[in-house]
Amino acid sequence: MTTIIGVKLSNRMEHSNEFQNIISKFGCSIKTRIGLHSTCSYVCANWGIILLEIVDDSITSELSRDLSRLDGVRVQSMNL
């Protein structure tokens, strides 16, 4: 089974360090990380969507819980 965790980070610039620390803690269980945010030459959006492909389903709940504790973060997951 493949698990994808989707994260919407509303205050990307304020919470990116905390976010990075959390996913680094689970780094060996994350196969793919894709970050999406609006940007152009003069503006970088303060929100972003991050998709995480998880290879060890046993950490999904803990990772989701830790990320959800950040202010302005929404977490959803799907199993394929």
Image (tube, helix red, strand yellow):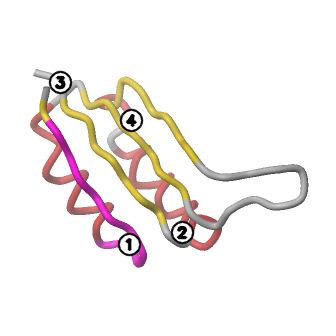
> Who comes first in sequence, dot 4 or dot 1?
4
Magenta stretch, residue numbers: 69-78
Q: CA distance from mark 1 to mark 2?
A: 7 Å
Q: CA distance from mark 2 to mark 3?
A: 27 Å
Residues marked 1 and 3 touching at CB (< 8 Å): no
Asked if the residues shown at circle 1 and circle 2 are in contact, with their CB atoms under 8 angstroms apart, the answer is yes
Residue at left 17%, top 39%? 78
Q: Main secondary structure of the magenta part?
A: strand
Give the mark toward the camera: 1 or 3. 3
> From the viewer's perspective, is 11 left or right of 30?
right
Residue at 37% of width from left, 54% of height from top?
A: 7
Check disc 2: other Cα within 10 Å, few if <14, some if 14-19, many if 20+. some
Query: Between tags 4 and 3, which lies in front?
Result: 3
Q: Which residue is mark 1?
A: 70
Height in image: 52 above or below 68?
above
Position of residue 14 relative to residue 77, above or below, is: below
Q: Residues within 10 Å of mark 1 (few under 14, many from 20)?
A: some
Picture coordinates of residue 48 (x, y %)?
54, 56
Of the two numbered discs 2 and 3 on the same chain, state the one appearing first in sequence: 3
Query: Residue 10 colored magenta?
Result: no
Residue receiving disc 2: 15
Q: Nearer the viewer, mark 4 or mark 2?
A: 2
Q: Which residue is mark 4?
A: 27
Q: Earlier in the sequence, mark 1 or mark 2?
A: 2
Residue marked by disc 3: 2
Residue 14, image x, y percentages: 60, 73
Give me the residue at 10% from left, 37% from top. 58
Q: Which amino acid type is marked by label 2?
A: His
Identified at 36% across, 24% down, the residue is 31
Seen from the viewer's position, the closer of residues 78 and 24 is 78
Q: Residues within 10 Å of mark 4 (few under 14, many from 20)?
A: some
Whichever of callouts 4 and 2 sits on the residue coming sooner in the sequence is: 2
